[in-house]
Amino acid sequence: DVYKRQAENLLAAAAAASAFGIRAEQVAETAPSLAAPEHRGRLLEIGDGISLVDDSYNASPLAVRRLLELLARAPGRRVAVLGEMYELGDLAQEAHRHAGEQSARACDLLVAVGGADAKTLADGAREAGFPDGLVHLVEDADRAADLLRSVLRPGDVVLVKGSRGVGLDRTVAALAGEGAA
């Protein structure tokens, strides 16, 4: 499904390129060399059969919803690590509550990262019926990594998504044994 989303992006880019006279064959020749930007849809195996989807670069309500839809179809125990979504203005509270509600349907364990908006996200999950003991609220990316180290199990699928300012790339780096990017 991640590949389907990227294929849709490639098709949209090809359509736009055709408006500038670039032939479909030229797009097809270039496509194999394309790579996602850092911290966008990167799939990592971090040991014990744990799969981590690193989409920690940024977040919007639509992007969070789409990735939670993908996570809901993943095999194994599904863990969502969701940081706050910044720059939403008056929509912030509603967007975070809705993300929490979506999490309640998509994952088996939720880690909300940040301040007041992360609390709204966690509350939204609980209000949607997600068991309190499976919702964790932590204040920053480093505490998220510490918590995950203690709760992850073999075979888990972990989605990490949040606005860049939350710093969830540090969570990914800590779990994957990489230097922070």
Image (spheres, rainbow, N blue to C red):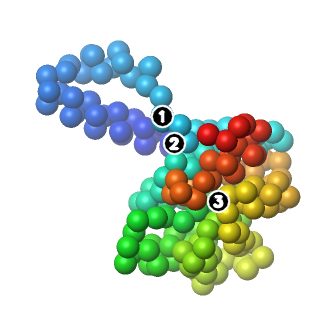
- Which residue is the site of mark 3? 81
Question: Tag 3: residue type?
Answer: Val
To which residue does mark 1 refer? Answer: 36
The C terminus lies in quadrant: top right
Q: Amino acid at mark 2?
A: Arg
CA distance for labels 2 and 3:
15 Å
The residue tagged 2 is: 40
Q: Is residue 177 above or below residue 161?
A: above
Q: Residues within 10 Å of mark 3 (few under 14, many from 20)?
A: many
Question: Is disc 2 surrounded by few (<14), some (14 to 19) or many (20+) residues within 10 Å?
Answer: some
Q: Residue at x 74, y 40 (%)?
A: 176
User: Would residue 112 appear left or right of 17 to someone viewing this image?
Assistant: right
Proximity of marks 2 and 3: CB atoms separated by less than 8 Å: no
Where residue 133 sits in the image (x, y, percent)? Answer: 78, 76
Residue 123 percent location from the top left of the image: 61, 81
Q: Name the secondary structure under disc 2.
A: loop
Which one is earlier in the sequence, the residue at label 1 or at label 3? 1
The percent position of residue 125, horizontal first and vertical second, equals 61, 76
Q: CA distance from mark 1 to mark 3?
A: 20 Å
Mark 1 and mark 2 residues within 8 Å of each other at the beta carbon: yes
Tell me if I can see residue 20 in this picture.
yes
Could you say whether the residue bearing mark 1 is in a helix, strand or loop? loop
Q: Secondary structure at mark 3?
A: strand
Q: Position of residue 65 (x, y in %)?
A: 47, 61
Q: Which mark is residue 145?
A: none
Residue drawn where x is 61% and y is 77% of the image: 119
Which of 34/180 is in front? 180
- Label 1 neighbour load within 10 Å: few <14, some 14-19, many 20+: few
